[in-house]
Amino acid sequence: MRNSYLNEQLMWTPVPRLSRHVGLVRRVVATLRRLHARARERRELLAMSDRDLRDIGLTRLDAWREANKPLWRS
């Protein structure tokens, strides 16, 4: 009888839902990946030659300004 009562109680015990947090974790990971890619692209801009920058329509000053923006600014 006691086992039956315990099993019944365990069935109705609320279990924290990890699924609620999975979406949050995915969004955080996606944001971190986006910030990392943005930082890499800005470093690559600084490494480009003046000729390469001209080819894409930027000046050295444009590249410098873009590279020195905070990561959260696109």
Image (cartoon, rainbow, N blue to C red):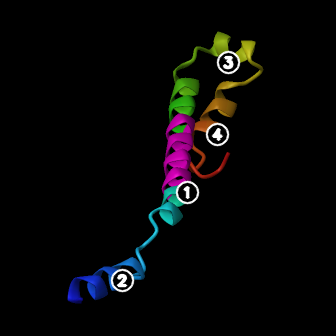
Q: Classify the position of the N terminus by image quarter.
A: bottom left
Q: Residue at x 49, y 57 (%)?
A: 22
Element under disc 1: helix
Q: Is residue 55 left or right of residue 32?
A: right
Rendered location of residue 3, percent (x, y): 22, 83
Where is mark 2, residue-wise? Answer: 8
Where is mark 4, residue-wise? Answer: 65
Q: Earlier in the sequence, mark 3 or mark 4?
A: 3
The kind of residue on which mark 4 rests is Arg
Q: Residue furthest left?
A: 2
The kind of residue on which mark 3 rests is Leu
Q: CA distance from mark 1 to mark 4?
A: 34 Å
Query: Which labelled disc corresponds to residue 23?
Result: 1
Q: Nearer the viewer, mark 1 or mark 3?
A: 1
The kind of residue on which mark 2 rests is Glu
Rendered location of residue 45, percent (x, y): 58, 25
Q: Nearer the viewer, mark 1 or mark 4?
A: 1
Element under disc 2: helix
Q: Earlier in the sequence, mark 1 or mark 3?
A: 1
| Magenta-tinted stretch | 25-38
Rendered location of residue 29, percent (x, y): 49, 48
